[in-house]
Image (cartoon, coloured by chain):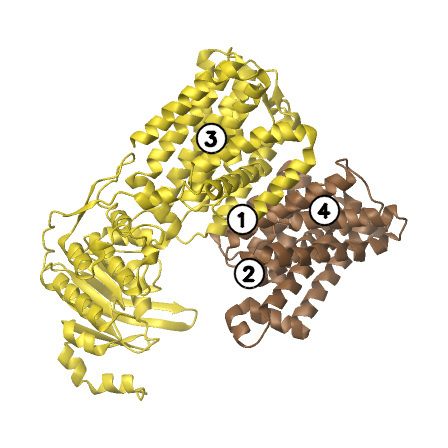
Chain colours: A brown, B yellow
Amino acid sequence: MNGAAVLTLGLDIVTTAAILFTVATGLLIIFGVMKIVNFAHGAFITLGAYAGLVASELGLSPWLGLPLAFLAGAACGALVERCVVRPLYGRPLDAILATWGLGIIIGELLTLVFGREVQFVGSPLSGTVDVLGEAYSVYRLFLVVAALIVGGGFAWLLGATRLGLATRAVIMNEDLARGLGINAGWVRFITFSLGSGLAGLAGALITPLSSVDPNMGVPWLLNAFMLVMVSGASLGALLAASVLLGGAQVVISSLASPILGGLTIVVLAALLLRVRPKGFAR
Amino acid sequence: MSRVFLVALLCLAAVLAGPLLLDTYTINILIRSFLFAAVALSVDLLWGYSGFLTFGQSAFFGVGAYAAALCFSQFGYSPWIGLLSLVAALGAAALLALVQGWLSFYHGSTPLYASVVSLVVPVVVTQILFSGGIFTGSSSGLTAYDTPDFEIEDWFRIAGVFMVLVTTVAVIFVRSDAGRVLVALRDNEARCAYLGLNTARQRILLLVVTACIAAIAGWLYAGSSGVVAPELAGFVFGTELVIWVALGGRGTLLGPVLGTILIDFTSSYASGSLPFLWKLLLGIAFILVIVALPQGLIPAVTGRLRRKRAENVVPGLAAAKPRPRPDPDQVAIYLDSVSRSFGSLKILEAISFKARPGELVSLVGPNGAGKTTLMRCLSDGAERSGGRIAINGHDIGTLPPYRCVGFGLGRKFQTANVFDTLSVAECLAVARVRLHLPSFWRRADTLELPQAALDILRATSLDQALATPAMLLSHGQKQALELAMVVALEPSVVLLDEPTAGLTQQERRQIGGVLTDLAITHGLCLLLVEHDLDFVREISSRVVVLHQGRLVLDGTVQDVIASELVRTIYAGAAHG
């Protein structure tokens, strides 16, 4: 393998890790705070992708599609938290099922409105840029920046704001936090809305790389779910998991076969959990 | 039981006569519905009964279907090839189930992790099918292979009979003594392990059996439809199965079977006229059921399937043949410099003592002295960080709890630890499973218990409440029930963590009497954690005092009472 191929592989690993991190963050934050797995995450990703599609069909700037996607996801998440998720705290397996049911509903509604067919959204940034003499997609590199903004934003929100303090308290010991006057219900509501909004944003971010269809979220959901399982409630662990497992995915896809590559994350994560139940979390 | 056979016979007659009354289109759809219902039944056994939420039964269905389709497309059809493909289907499914089970179930695995693995399995199987090129037909699957030369009506009868038979066997099984163990696993897996049951092996066995049911259904599907596609093994079909089971009513067997037939049958009509709306309605119904009606739609409407449990026959109690008294020269509990630490934090340090049969040793010490940790180390080989422990002369090494129970150990937890949805009699029966392999097809009408367990039941009037579900018992009765379950194991060493916590004075006296009786009359070795020093004084033959993870005193009750050290420890003034 020559130097150029190695460079491309390296860039692929970095950008893939960034994409996985962006897609999984929303799921992680919900799992961390609420101890439930939001299986509607894939549907929120799809919803965000369609929000981006609508924005581009209305002739809006493609950049405007991103906040729109976030808002669509967050609004939908807020509604869902109030109506469906709230009664299911303390029944984590049932919450998985109910949110999966929600995912089906959202998917069918999207199908009713937009139809079944695959659609494409233009990229806000097209063309390539020279990285050490190799032409590489500008948009993929932009996704690394986006991941850094999302991760940094969350770290700031958790580490430097009152809401973040309350959230960390709820993560560590919900009963105690409630006893200290923290409105845990409110923290959960905000968390679920934010997490859903992030899923929507991630959906709009990834669509220029692939296409939009009502079931596009499911494979992303699976990978994000496995990454969150090995990361516990830690953003740092999620970053490590995205780089290592995403890196393994890229390497296996390019050296062996894309189909094996598609299995890398789920299989490696399951084996890792069998050997080390805490995964990447310390 | 005879009612089960009567209903089964009626259903058999119905599926055999069905083709005479139904049109071809309906027959075609119902074949598929019957087979899906059999897979849904397997999901209900796993999820509704044993509490393992699985998204992966579709993988076994797919394996069965592809085993048939691959064999038929490679070798054509003959009865021998048919048999060969069926054996291949069962073998492959069982092997896959073993791998999945090994991954999912081990001492310390969590339900969420098992569900995660169940999700990975269908994803992997589908991807393998996708990557199979011409051999597996990749994304379009396999069609136009030779199939057994049956009429569509015959397939209807085969699928129908298969479904009715599997359902009947499953109903008989879950009502049997062995089937009850599934519910015990669902309610409280840790308690099962401490009753000496190898829970991982039981779960893996159940998974293998249900995988075989799904594989046969898949094999019949491939034979009857002549088409297979990777989606049959997929994760989405796996979740659909869960949805049907939830709507039909988990943990009822008949609910999921009827629900699946009804939903799949309606789907194929409805999806023609209003395809997306139907799935939308199904999704909404599913969420409503999960949130508001966890018992499912069919039981909610009929209100019948569940209530049957209430009219359970209560077995008569009988005394089991007494075991010989433990050899008084055998050291029952042996600890040699046992330690437990978390990083640099030392919970237990260099604990060594022995206890013999017939002794009632109390373990006392202030909160945080390491008493409960010591109990945990004694009953689970993986718990301690260093030192050696032997129970009745058997080194426990790093063996899991059920193996320690095999050496004659019984452990009663601090908080009453019983099987909530089982009745008192059923809880006790589960405790006897280790000693007597239960029947897989019927319920015993007598329950043999050691005399000591009967005494506990009589002293606490639990023998009058044998049919009461354990969750309805009072706190004291639950404690007594758990103690009776532990004694029913016929152990020679019993660990008891605060058996009298939260009990009334009278209950405390009764339990105290039972404990001294166990030690003196039956020659058991009891190790007791207790805070109530008056109680300790009344019943113990020896007292071991722990303080800050170290053994500070090992002597008679008189020694402890006289000890200046113990007084300062409890007065909180001990330093250095």
Q: Are marks 1 and 4 on the same chain?
A: no
Looking at the rendered structure, the kind of residue marked 3 is: Ala
Dot 4 corresponds to which residue? A46
Q: Residues within 10 Å of mark 4 (few under 14, many from 20)?
A: many
Looking at the rendered structure, the kind of residue marked 2 is: Ala
Q: Position of residue B32 (x, y in %)?
A: 54, 25
Q: CA distance from mark 1 to mark 3?
A: 22 Å
Q: CA distance from mark 1 to mark 2?
A: 31 Å
Q: Residues within 10 Å of mark 1 (few under 14, many from 20)?
A: many
Q: What number of labels is visible?
A: 4
Q: Are marks 2 and 3 in contact (CB under 8 Å)?
A: no
Dot 2 corresponds to which residue? A281
Residue at (63% x, 62% y) in the render: A235
Q: Position of residue B212 (x, y in %)?
A: 43, 30
Which mark identifies residue B38? 3
Dot 1 corresponds to which residue? B290
Indicate the secondary structure of the residue bearing disc 3: helix
Q: Are marks 2 and 3 on the same chain?
A: no
- Indicate whether B226 appears above or below A257: above
Q: Position of residue A179 (x, y in %)?
A: 52, 75
